[in-house]
Image (cartoon, rainbow, N blue to C red):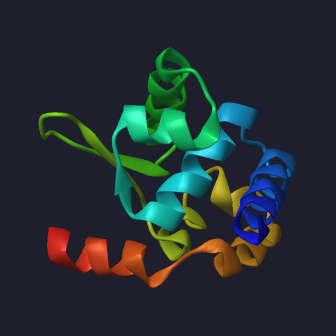
Amino acid sequence: MVETDRQTRAARLLQQLGLKEYEAKCFVVLTRKGTATAKQISEITDVPRTRVYDAIRVSEAQGLVEIQHTNPRQYRAVPLEEATRTPVGSTSPAWTNCRGFSTTSNRRTRATAR
């Protein structure tokens, strides 16, 4: 329950910073899980799977998500430090408030991907 509340607060904060609802929900899940498939994201967020693909595509264009070309496709949020340097992240210093919603799994995943 506490985890869901934190994810909801994080998604709302990201929406205030300019992300659409589904983009924010997907980004929050990816920062928590490290990597996930569209099916996993959909199951966790209750975002319809077809809309997950749309949200991921927009987030990738904004520099917030990376697509791993595996089968099935895996998606990964860029580290929050990197997200703050994207056009979306640099529009507000409030992005730094999102750091508390990240986990070390995202950093660990990033290190192994190199």
Left or right: residue 108 versus residue 62 is: left
Question: In this picture, is 113 found above or below 100?
Answer: above
52 over 30 or under it: above or below: above
User: Residue 76 appears in which quarter of the rendering?
Assistant: bottom left
Q: Viewer-proximal residue, 74 or 67?
A: 74
- In percent of width and height, residue 113 lies at 17, 68
The quadrant of the picture occupied by the N terminus is bottom right
Q: Would residue 80 be visible to someone looking at this image?
A: yes
Question: Residue shown at 72%/77% (left/top)?
Answer: 96
Relative to 113, is 8 above or below?
above
Residue 89 vertical placement versus 18 (above, below) = below
Q: Position of residue 107 (x, y in %)?
A: 37, 79
> Which residue is found at the position 78% from the left and 76% from the top?
97
User: Residue visible at 63% across and 32% down?
Assistant: 46
Q: Looking at the rendering, in which quadrant would you find the C terminus?
A: bottom left
Left or right of 111, for residue 87: right
| Residue toward you, 10 or 58 | 10
Q: Residue furthest front?
A: 1
Which residue sits at x=19%, y=34%?
72
Can residue 114 be seen at all in this image of the molecule? no
Front residue of 26/82: it is 26
Left or right, 111 with reference to 66: left
Residue 70 placement (x, y as % from top left):
13, 40
